[in-house]
Image (cartoon, rainbow, N blue to C red):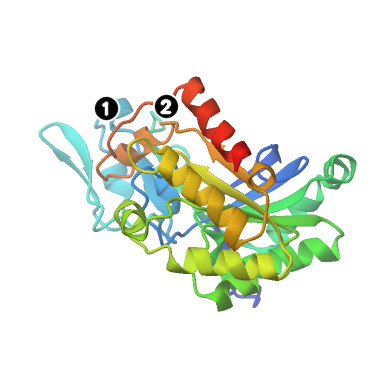
């Protein structure tokens, strides 16, 4: 648990999106926290995976002027063969090279900053009228907000004190004690079911789905309002066999109607360029499923 000099609980936040319409019912403010235990090869926000601040660098806009070299306290920047190079083993994401006035071409941005519960909630409560009129509220997402359970739980509890409904978006890939902690004050839970085959789940995310399925059962037993989602990744989990198996799990194991509690998220490649900017290999590029195929999958779910 991290606290500041005033003993205030601090979390690592990489984005706060106001007027969000896809992260729970109504109009919501979505707080995206840093940190995720999974390494899904299709991740749209790879800058969210680490708990630490992450430097994003656009080399295509860089003129190699060298101003960032002079200000970096860790000697992470250098020019090699006429091009600026960032040594990620040295970079701490301190932000010195991304400070205003340093990079004239604005090629650098640090994703992730420390915020107290009060600082986050001051933004959330400022939109109270939007929540009240639309049935919306606060959503805590990631990364995976279960990586920061104390901070997540504190945000949700504070929202309830302010009569704001709450939602979490989670992978479920944590021990039950952690999941229980962050969902105690969650009115809605948006829950990923990425792949029913455990070996494929490990290949795609580097983590077993054992906790994912067990925790889903326990949350339903608690009476939590669940909304399950599968991001459709070509040649990984978008087969009719996997979608059928997922829908049957929701129906037979959880006792819920898949047509009401299961959503498919068609693939998009909006996050692919981010990989280059944070200095890691870009994932394989895929094409979005056709509208006809998506319709067939949804018809399959409706028939179960």
Say whether residue 14 is visible. Answer: no
Residue placed at 49% from the left, 69% from the top? Answer: 174
Residue placed at 21% from the left, 41% from the top? Answer: 85
Task: Please provide percent x and percent y for residue 99.
Answer: 45, 44
Residue 238 lies left or right of residue 175; in this view the side is left
| Quarter where residue 136 is shown | top right
How far apart are the alpha carbons under marks 2 and 1?
Answer: 35 Å
Residue 238 lies left or right of residue 63; in this view the side is right
Direction front: furthest residue:
303
Residue placed at 41% from the left, 31% from the top? Answer: 269
| Quarter where residue 283 is shown | top left
Residue at mark 1: 63
Task: Please provide percent x and percent y for residue 2.
Answer: 55, 74
Residue placed at 68% from the left, 70% from the top? Answer: 221
Dot 1, how many residues are within 10 Å of its Cα: few (below 14), some (14-19), or many (20+)?
some
Asked if labels 1 and 2 touch by Cβ distance under 8 angstroms, the answer is no
Say whether residue 12 is visible. Answer: yes
What is the secondary structure assignment of the residue under circle 2? loop
Q: Which mark is residue 288?
A: 2
Q: Is residue 213 above or below residue 54?
A: below
| Depth order, front residue of 285/223 | 223
Q: Is residue 95 above or below residue 185?
A: above
């Amino acid at each position: 648990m991290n606290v500041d000099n005033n003993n205030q609980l601090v979390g690592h936040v990489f984005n706060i999106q106001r007027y969000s319409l896809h992260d729970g019912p109504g109009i919501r403010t979505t707080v995206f926290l840093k940190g995720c235990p999974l390494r899904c090869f299709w991740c749209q926000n790879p800058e969210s995976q680490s708990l630490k601040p992450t430097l994003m660098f656009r080399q295509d806009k860089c003129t190699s002027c060298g101003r960032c070299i002079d200000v970096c306290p860790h000697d992470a920047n250098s020019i090699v063969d006429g091009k600026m190079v960032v040594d990620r083993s040295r970079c701490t994401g301190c932000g010195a090279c991304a400070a205003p006035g340093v990079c004239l071409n604005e090629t650098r941005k640090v994703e992730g900053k420390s915020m107290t519960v009060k600082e986050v909630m001051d933004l959330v409560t400022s939109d109270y009228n939007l929540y009240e009129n639309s049935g919306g509220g606060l959503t805590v997402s990631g990364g995976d907000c279960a990586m920061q359970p104390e901070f997540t739980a504190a945000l949700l509890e504070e929202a309830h004190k302010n009569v704001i409904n709450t939602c979490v978006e989670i992978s479920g890939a944590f021990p039950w004690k952690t999941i229980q902690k962050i969902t105690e004050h969650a009115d809605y839970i948006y829950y990923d079911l990425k792949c029913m085959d455990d070996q494929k789940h490990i290949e795609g995310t580097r983590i077993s789905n054992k906790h994912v399925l067990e925790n889903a059962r326990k949350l339903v037993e608690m009476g939590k309002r669940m909304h399950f989602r599968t991001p459709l990744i070509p040649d990984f989990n978008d087969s009719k066999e996997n979608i059928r198996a997922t829908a049957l799990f929701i129906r037979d194991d959880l006792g819920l109607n898949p047509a009401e509690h299961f959503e498919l998220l068609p693939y998009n490649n909006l996050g692919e360029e981010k990989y280059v900017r944070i200095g890691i290999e870009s994932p394989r590029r895929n094409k979005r499923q056709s509208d006809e195929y998506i319709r067939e999958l949804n018809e399959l779910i409706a028939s179960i």
